[in-house]
Amino acid sequence: MSATFTAEQIDTVYRVIAERRDVRHFIPGDVDETVLARLLQAAHHAPSVGYMQPWRFIRIASPALRSALVALVEAERVRTAEALGQRGAEFMRLKVEGIRECGALFVVALADGRDAHVFGRRTLPEMDLASVACAIQNMWLAARAEGLGMGWVSLFDPDQLARLLAMPAGARPVAVLCLGHVEQFYPRPMLEMEGWDTRRTLADLVTVDGWDKRGA
Amino acid sequence: MSATFTAEQIDTVYRVIAERRDVRHFIPGDVDETVLARLLQAAHHAPSVGYMQPWRFIRIASPALRSALVALVEAERVRTAEALGQRGAEFMRLKVEGIRECGALFVVALADGRDAHVFGRRTLPEMDLASVACAIQNMWLAARAEGLGMGWVSLFDPDQLARLLAMPAGARPVAVLCLGHVEQFYPRPMLEMEGWDTRRTLADLVTVDGWDKRGA
């Protein structure tokens, strides 16, 4: 018999899911190392395709490397604005990262040597990334519960970041994670508050037995 | 001031993360529709790159479609065993899905029209999949809290599954999700219990300031 969760505990799980935010605004302060260790353990307890555990976590401790990351992300932010055309100026007004201010900084990568893992990946090789994303989501939820903000930044050139961190061939960085203290968690997703987009109606995203078939 | 989580609530979050399992063994019984609706809401509260919300959920209600899914997965299971070479026979002895037995069955897909979303995806277009994986992880954790098992099956040909469900060009199925009642949750990951692989030592997956640099 497996341990069950009480109604109150179930509510807590839904609450942390609902109140998790992609955070870009941090206040100064180091992050407790024991808390960081718990967050990484939470990540490591994610599911992974064929149990391959493809994740690697690189803590960025050096101020010089942190500055290099800021520069990489800034360069991509400008290129993204150009690619966005009409919405470029609006995009440039958004705060899209908190790399300089956050208390702890990580790069998360797909490990090298993934081709050896075929289970669940023969036709869907990208399942390795899905596993890493599950690990990051675990970390995000655990951070929210601990009262820490976390942001996932994907505005960077992965090849340049791989070189910066001396990654071997076959490894690929997929996230810059900013972690730190916050004045408050956004009451709604920041991109919604800023008018970038709105939350879709869930019923529009769920169908039955086919792409366009609505349920009863 | 944002609402905080008590020490007990924080423990609950870590507990659901630790006790979530990728489930392949189900016992008969329908899944309560109000619980399913809560799970889908949890999924829909995942983070998404540039707030694009690229997820689509297709409930498989038709017995004929369920059988077609069983056949698709069985075909890929055999091809995977062939591709695995030496470990093929060992793989064939594993239970890798519970499509026939589970109480509720979903296909999760990346929506079409994703090229319009550039924010956070210019250099890392695969971030759409990362968002969908976060949504599925939310659903998984919520299901575990509710006492329901869930399994993510990625043993299928995505093009065939897309055709089966009349997906438009540009959409891509990434998960078959089995949900249902369980006799118990595996005490450890099933692939670990079955000797397929072991859990890595977390310290081996965390470095500081570069790929091979261990921390203090």
Image (tube, coloured by chain):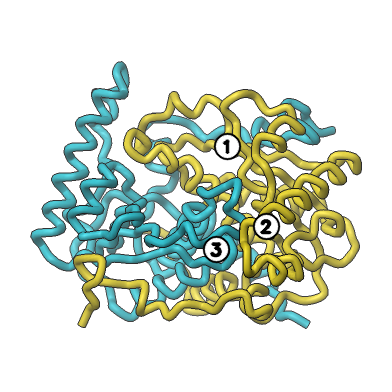
Chain colours: A cyan, B yellow
Helix, strand or loop status at disc 3: loop
Q: Chain of mark 2?
A: B
Mark 2 vs mark 3: give the one in front.
Answer: 2
* Residue that protrudes farthest toward the front in the picture: B86
* Mark sitting on residue B82: 2
Asked if residue A59 lies left or right of residue B6, the reply is left
Which residue sits at x=66%, y=34%? B159
Which residue sits at x=87%, y=45%? B67
Q: Is residue A211 visible?
A: yes
Front-lying residue, B141 or A119 = A119
Q: Quadrant of the C terminus of chain A?
A: top right
Q: Are marks 1 and 2 in contact (CB under 8 Å)?
A: no
Q: Chain of mark 3?
A: A
Mark 3 vs mark 1: give the one in front.
Answer: 3
The residue labelled by disc 1 is B110
Residue A180's spot in the image, x, y percent? 28, 63
Asked if residue A75 lies left or right of residue B65, the reply is left
Q: Amino acid at mark 3?
A: Ser
* Residue that protrudes farthest toward the top in the picture: A86
Residue B64's spot in the image, x, y percent? 90, 40
Mark 1 vs mark 2: give the one in front.
Answer: 2
Res A120 → quadrant:
bottom right
Give the alpha-carbon distance from disc 2 to disc 3, as whole Å.
21 Å
Res B35 → quadrant:
bottom right
* Mark sitting on residue A48: 3
Mark 3: few, some, or many residues within 10 Å (few <14, many ≥20)? Answer: many
